[in-house]
Amino acid sequence: MKRFDWRCLAVSSVLLATLAARAETRPQYGGTLHVAVRAAPGSLDPADAGPDSFARRNITLLMFETLVTMDDSGRIHPALATSWQASAGNQRWQLRLRHGVKFHDGTALTAEAAAVSLRAANPSWNVSTDGDSVVIERDAADPEMLAELALPRNAIAQRNAGGKPVGTGPFHLADWQPGKKLTLGAEEGYWRGRPFLEGVEIELGKSYREQLMALDVGRDDLVEVAPDQAHRAWPEGRRLANSAPAELLALVFARDVQSPEDKLLREALALSIERGSIRSVLLQGAGQPAGGILPNWISGYGFVFPTSTDLPRARHDRDQVRKVATWTLGYDGNDQVARFLAERISLNAKDAGLSLQPTATATADLRLMRIPLASSDPWVALAGVQAVAGIAPGKSRGSTIEDLYAAEQAVLAAQRIIPLFHLPVYEAAGAALKNWNLRPDATWNLADAWMGSGKP
Amino acid sequence: MRRAVYNLAIPDVILNTVNRASRLALNPRLRQVFLVMFALVIAASAADWSGPEQQLARKIVAVTGPGAVALTVENRSSLSKRDSDIIQGGLHGALDGLGLRLVRAEQAAATVKITLSESPSSYVWVAEIHQGSADSAVVMVSVPRSQGANTTHDSVPLSLRKIPLWAQEDPILDVVVLEENTAPTHIAVLDSEKVSLYRMQNGKWQLEQALEIVHARPWPRDLRGRLVPARDHLLDAYLPGVICQSTAAMPLSLNCRESDDPWPLVPGTLSGGAPSVFPSAGMANGVSVAIPQMKAFFAPSRNFFTGALTPGVGKFMTVPKFYSAAPLPRDKYTLWLFAAIDGQVHMVDGVSDQAAKLEWGNDLAGVRTACGAGWQILATNAGNGAEDSVRAYEIVDRDPAAVSAPIEMPGETTALWTESKGDTAVAVVRNRETGNYEAFRLAMSCSQ
């Protein structure tokens, strides 16, 4: 097993502490925060089924709120719901709504509005109201219901006459140029208290390179940093923060295992990949080699899944198959590192006698995917990866750590997915941005952020 | 206990091959003595871990059966080395009790690698068991983390002392000592939703009454508030846009109203007003000092004073918006210091307003003591990477001179108010380790 890199700990600890510290002054009201992100969501609706990304989640949570929230220790806290009760063996959940909360259009948050919102995001849920409560009934026990309700996609939105979603969050929508720019204004009547920032301007669809340049010239205050660039961003004096490894980089097959030979070849591919050297060279030391789906910080047992290369065994598996077809390996053509990774994996596969053809086209036998983990709740995170990878959810969830381990093993045994790395999210901030930090699950807290004098 | 860390952070990685156990295996009598002693130590100091130790041991033995195993234990969690050692000892004892003999790897029928790991909510102990050429088996248990770590705070024997008053999870806005003997015996704690009265009984604080603060509008962020003891009733509570007045007799009630009335900047005892109705919280040093009362208007939806003063400092009816203020009486006038929101400290004497950029934070409080020049300013530090601290200063001409060593605080200071007696201040700190809010009394000592 690879020992952890203490330098990463030292750097990230110092940086996180620096960014999190309120430092010299009381928070100051005013100022506009300029942010740039790679994602360019086509919709602001939390329930929209478009591509998931950390940026999209963060944008959602600026404008919308969930019924409950989950802290860094996995504990659930009230948000738009003040209390909740489970019955019928966690199959029925009743959540009482907070009084006095208003949507940004001035209408009151009601149980009916919350129910409509949850139904839109979860067509399979049976959502009803009971006085000032929302009642959710599932077909089977759902002990993770509260963790699911804490997901940004379950944020409460009211769709107005024009179909635009309106939230209850700390910022309201001021201007929206899809794919280009999003402008938000502080919500004066926000029930948790008006944010310190006057507004947030978010440039969408910006490459990592464009973002770093914008930070350097002082045009943006908060930008994303590519994992392989993080080691460079730090020595250049930028204020860098990283989340826990919250993103899974994996190979995902388009189809289930088709035959015993197919199974052997998939196993051979998994055993042939040199995660250690890929991490050192292509990822420049970022992330953690992954043998399992859940990172260790979420499951606590992630280290038991082997990540080492076993070329003799890979060749042995390959040699048991008479005819080997060429697989196409899809990757995101806009992501240069993804292309390098795909090419490197193809070379590894070739060493085991397999044939992989990297392609940037949409259809492929297997794809190199970056999957943002849905939650720091292990069951919700696992289910999220299953959904993205097209793996049918298991029948029963269980409740113990060994049930979770068995469920993850079952997903891996299906051989639809080959985990490669768990990657942190890196963000760089300008000196003027104060009291901002990146949580382990890569969400921001901008409601408490403020703009200072610019001196770090 | 340290805080949880992520996968990157694996402090105190300890990899112990069980040489000790393998040596003991050579001498069964010695081993028995050792295990009995170890069990006693465990029973005395680590009872909390015994459940999961037994549980994991049973799971391991269910795989290996009784016999000889080689055991390693690795700590890759935030557990301290001491706890890890205790758990390791407990696991040895539990495995031995179930018939497993701990031997060297070359003598073992199975090897067991136990890893003490963790997730956000639990400690996760994982045993990987290798037997012959078979695939390894994995068994594990999870142990919920204890909620809230205990921390201790060293008192710093400096001229500026901090005396713990109260701590809680919710933000504390102010604490006022209502009665005291050698130590406070009756306090009121202000937070965003209530005023809580606590009385010391049998060495423990007991909640006497909690008075709800009724407010219609959402509070601003970085909420601030003050408690001020009153003459004809117990206290007043000042919050942005809201003023609450308690009744006089128990059981108390609190009547809150929306109000932009100004907040007092000078404790009643220093302004020549009535001393506290609580004799035990009487005048400091027996010295009667009168400073003209000064009040300032607080922005109802912000975290600062608007700068409007009443009655004003000489010709100045307004000063720049400020976070905090402190008076320094001179022979013929009072010099007022305002920590403005632009980061400067404005020194206003009634005729001039002199602004200076000092290495201070935004929180100031004035105290009247028998030390030095008699009046000091307590100021938080300016941050810039320095430790959170508070330090006492005197102002000579217009230049501040430090008159105490900085007293380290366990986190950022969120409130600093002069107490009603005028000779001490209350500082509220958000503990950077626990996240809890802690209120301290800051008192000057003249001994240094």
Image (cartoon, coloured by chain):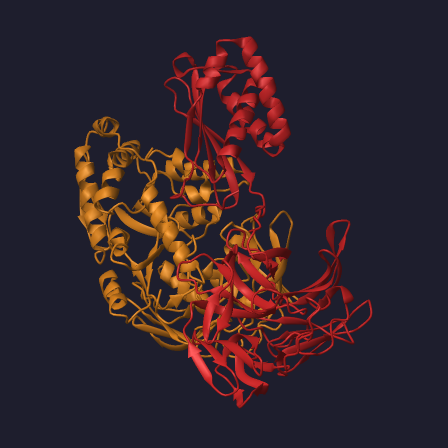
Which residue is at 54% across, 40% downward?
Answer: A398
Which image quarter: residue A201?
Answer: bottom left
In the rendered view, tell whether residue B112 sits above or below residue A403: above
In the rendered view, tell whether residue A248 sits above or below residue A168: above
Which residue is at 51% across, 39% downward?
Answer: B123
Q: Quadrant of the N terminus of chain A?
A: top left
Which residue is at 43% across, 44% downward?
Answer: A297
> Which chain is in orange here?
A
In the image, residue A379 lies at what x, y percent? Answer: 48, 46
The residue nearer to you, when weighing A374 against B98, is: B98
For the question of whether residue A115 can be seen, the reply is: no
In the image, residue B100 lies at what x, y percent? Answer: 52, 16
In the rendered view, tell whether residue B270 sits above or below residue A358: below
For the question of whether residue B400 can be seen, the reply is: yes
Q: Quadrant of the C terminus of chain A?
A: bottom left
The residue nearer to you, when weighing B298 against A313, is: B298
In the image, residue A449 lies at what x, y percent? Answer: 44, 67
The residue nearer to you, when weighing B292 against B174, is: B292
The residue nearer to you, when weighing B1 against A275, is: B1
> Which chain is in red here?
B
